[in-house]
Image (cartoon, helix red, strand yellow):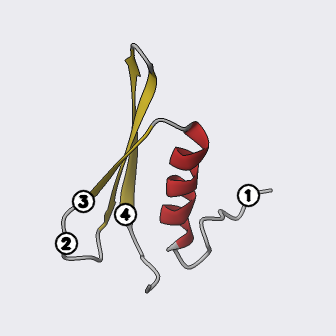
């Protein structure tokens, strides 16, 4: 997978009777394809999806101030 240069990642949280529904929507502006929408009920899995999105960038999702 090629490195991305710009993109958007949106996390939507909905309270459901059975718990949280987390929707992670990602769009890499370099890709011609549509946004990708993934649904999770596990917070760790949703965070993993965000990390995977950030890892596509040249710095692996790290900013100069990241610790």
Secondary structure beneath label 3: loop
Residues under labels 1 and 2: Cα distance?
32 Å
Q: Is residue 62 above or below residue 40?
A: below
Q: Residue at x 61, y 44 (%)?
A: 44
**Residue identifier under label 1:** 65
Location of residue 60 in the rendering, given as x and y in whole percent from the top left corner: 61, 72
* Labels 1, 2: front one: 2
Residue 65 sits in quarter:
bottom right
Residues under labels 3 and 4: Cα distance?
10 Å
Q: How crowded is mark 1: few (under 14 residues within 10 Å), some or many (20 or more)?
A: few
* Labels 1, 3: front one: 3
Q: How crowded is mark 2: few (under 14 residues within 10 Å), some or many (20 or more)?
A: few
> Which labelled disc corresponds to residue 33?
2
Q: Earlier in the sequence, mark 4 or mark 2?
A: 4
Q: Earlier in the sequence, mark 3 or mark 4?
A: 4
> Which labelled disc corresponds to residue 7?
4
Location of residue 11 in the rendering, given as x and y in whole percent from the top left corner: 41, 40
Q: Which of marks 1 and 2 is nearer the N terminus?
A: 2
| Outermost top residue | 17
Number of numbered discs: 4
* Labels 3, 4: front one: 3
Labels 2 and 3 touching (C-beta < 8 A): no
Foreground of the two, 26 or 57? 26
Secondary structure beneath label 1: loop
Residues under labels 1 and 3: Cα distance?
29 Å
**Residue identifier under label 3:** 35
Q: Earlier in the sequence, mark 4 or mark 1?
A: 4
Q: Residues within 10 Å of mark 4 (few under 14, many from 20)?
A: some
């Amino acid at each position: 997978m090629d490195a991305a240069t710009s993109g958007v990642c949106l996390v939507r949280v909905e309270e459901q009777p059975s718990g949280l529904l987390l929707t992670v929507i990602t769009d890499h502006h370099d890709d011609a394809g549509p946004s990708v929408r993934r649904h999770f009920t596990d917070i760790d899995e949703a965070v993993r999806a965000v990390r995977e999105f950030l890892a596509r960038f040249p710095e692996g999702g790290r900013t100069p101030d990241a610790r």
